Amino acid sequence: MPDPADSHGLSELPLETMVACHECDLLMLKPQLQSGESAECPRCGYELYRHRHQVVRRSLALVTAALLLYVPANFLPIMQLNLLGQSSQDTVWSGVLGLYGTGMQGIAVVVFLCSMGVPLLKLLCQLAVLLSIRWGIGRSYGLLLYRIYQHLREWGMLEVYLMGTLVSIVKLIGLADLSLGFGLACFIGLLLLQVWLEVTMSPHQIWEALSGEDAHAGH
């Protein structure tokens, strides 16, 4: 647990040696953590950050798996509906096209951005940032892309889309012959991988690695 910085000598300390609590704004000296350890605010108990083992390698594996699932999750059938002799297969992409074709272009654009566009852009930004750290090149571009990623985090809403899909499945199950497709499993897998990636890709370690402060982030 870090000690609060001495206010008398606070102005003389380098900024990279200090950390501020996101909850109570307490300014304190940044502790040196070993793998698996976490730092907590001594005033409010908020976890400031956790030092994770092999962050870059594990994150690269997760982001690669998520990118492999992206295409089947969005373009393979989520469900197949049979009603009065007519059969239809629905995918995330066909849902966007359906909204656009029925005159709801604005909603179609929002659904596309939140369920397909932004999640893909986030994954590509994460991949570029991790490769920049892994290969030790383009750190300035890595810093820019990681800032962009931080602003995109609130716009990827796969969980909202999944919840809407599950609600639709529950409502349709009593009205028609409904069968779930492989695309739904891929979509759920993509969502879980992105959540796991958010947890694994420790922000403070990524920032330190991009700025050159942590040379062992991937080990």
Image: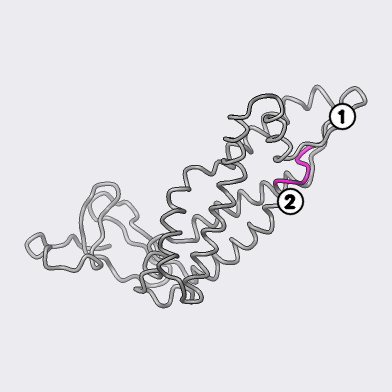
Residue 170: image quadrant is top right
Task: Report, in whole angstroms, how far the alpha carbon at label 1 lies from the one at label 2.
Answer: 22 Å
Question: Which residue sits at x=45%, y=59%?
Answer: 145
Crowd band around label 2 with a 10 angstrom C-alpha radius: few (<14), some (14–19), many (20+)? many
Quadrant in which the N terminus appears: bottom left
Residue 99 lies, with reference to residue 14, above or below; the image says: above
**Which percent across, then down, holds residue 95?**
71, 34
Secondary-structure class at tag 1: strand
The kind of residue tagged 2 is Pro
Secondary-structure class at tag 2: helix
The magenta stretch is 74-79
Residue receiving disc 2: 72
**Which percent across, then down, holds residue 32?**
30, 71
Residue receiving disc 1: 82
Crowd band around label 1 with a 10 angstrom C-alpha radius: few (<14), some (14–19), many (20+)? some
**Which percent across, then down, holds residue 149?**
47, 53
**Which percent across, then down, holds residue 154?**
47, 43
Question: Which residue sits at x=36%, y=74%?
Answer: 212
Residue 217: image quadrant is bottom left
Question: Which residue sits at x=25%, y=63%?
Answer: 2
Q: Does the magenta stretch include residue 11?
A: no
Residue 164 lies, with reference to residue 77, above or below; the image says: above
